[in-house]
Amino acid sequence: KNELDELGIVQGLGLDQTENGQIKITLQILKPGELKSSSGGGSGNKGVWTMTSQGETLFEAIRNARTKAERKIFFSHNKVVVIGEDLARKGVLPVLDFLTRDVEPRLTDSCFIAKGTAEKILKATHEQEDIPAEAILGLAESYKSTSMHPRDTKILNLVLDLDSETKDPIIAGIETSPSIDEENKELLKLTDTAVFQDDKLVGWFNSKETRGILWITGDVESGIVVLKPSSNKEDKVSIELTHAITKLTPKIADDKLSMEVMIDVKGNVGEETSLNLLKPETLEKLNKLLEEEIIKESESALIKAQGLGVDVFGFGEKTHKKLPEEWQKLKENWTEELKDLEVTIEVKAEIFGIGRTLKNLEYQNVQGEKQ
């Protein structure tokens, strides 16, 4: 049995590679007394005690941490695992072995890759949460409204992707940024997406390239696409994405594999400055511009992924399912096959909502002056 008042309950775990090859861990351990006395969020790091430890392995580093903690370190309530960039480039399988083998860590812990060190992420503060690990989980939920970074990656999903013959994993990146209001204060924010080959970090995709991945994989839930309908830089239209479905179709012709990507998108006009949306040709023009922007984002992700030789789209998985016999011939050299894979992207976009304002205020004012 474990007595509650004898446990150091871990909420966040950071993993880094030291210069001498050891594993450095950073732990966020709850301080229940201070949480109880807090009237709400916004007190920064006061709800946790952040400590570090090192060892030849992750398990040894955790045991060594016990020499600094008067309570037993307990992982069953951990929520977040942050892996430092250097460790991720070296390979994550050694540290994942402990997290999947030991009985305390949960396979539902959320995983992030730090741009820099995990220690810096775990020691950063947040204005709305006393427990920074909770803030990180809250940031991960923003994919539903922006589609600028991948879904929350659980340890189990990461292990399954690493074991897959057909797909390379992507994981949301996280970094710190200086506070505008206070000097020497670092705040958390999601950043580029980490892309893996085997178990090693091989590159980063920016936000637009990340959404390009999500367009092709069919994981775009919502978000804003800004269109520019004229040469005037002031003319901008914000389209809110409401619906997106993607269909991947592998094809074989003359013993050569190709992939057809069909993306069906629907959206609403959320904001615009210069158009008369009552004209059918205006919406047709916006549909065309939206299709072009989606193709642009998708192709940027495709070019970068093929250059790295990583299958972040699940092309191999789809080929395996649809063309199993052909896949047996392709899988041994799939990285090279992927680099030369011909991919066609077609998009059908439909903007069907313009909100409760038929004409924007600026357009009405101009028309009124002319009259």
Image: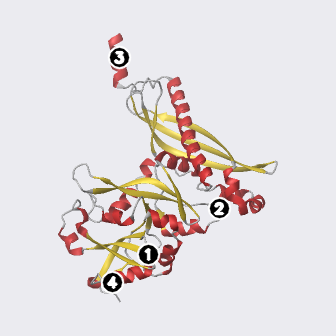
Where is 168 relative to 300, above or below? below
| Of callouts 2 and 1, the N-terminal one | 1
Write down the residue under mark 4: 66
Instruction: In the displayed orientation, state which residue is furthest to the bottom.
Output: 1
Write down the residue under mark 3: 366
Q: Quadrant of residue 69?
A: bottom left
| Of callouts 3 and 1, the N-terminal one | 1
Tell which tag, 2 or 1, sits nearer the viewer.
1
| Of callouts 4 and 2, the N-terminal one | 4
Type of amino acid at the residue the image marks with label 4: Arg
Q: Position of residue 78 (x, y in %)?
A: 38, 72
Q: Is residue 75 visible?
A: no
Type of amino acid at the residue the image marks with label 3: Val
Q: Position of residue 58 (x, y in %)?
A: 44, 78
The answer to whether the residues at label 4 and label 2 have Cβ atoms under 8 Å apart is no
- Left or right? Give the position of 178 relative to 330: left
Quarter containing the C terminus: top left
Q: Position of residue 275 (x, y in %)?
A: 43, 24
Disc 3 and disc 2: Cα gap in Å?
57 Å
Quarter containing the N terminus: bottom left
- Left or right? Give the position of 348 relative to 39: right
Instruction: In the displayed orientation, state which residue is furthest to the top.
Output: 371
Tell which tag, 3 or 1, sits nearer the viewer.
1
Disc 4 and disc 2: Cα gap in Å?
41 Å
Of 133 and 186, the residue lying toward us? 186
Disc 3 and disc 4: Cα gap in Å?
72 Å
User: Which circle marks residue 121 in the picture?
Assistant: none
Q: Quadrant of residue 190?
A: bottom left
Type of amino acid at the residue the image marks with label 2: Thr
User: Which circle marks residue 22 in the picture?
Assistant: 1
Residue at 48 percent across and 43 percent down: it is 242
Write down the residue under mark 2: 166
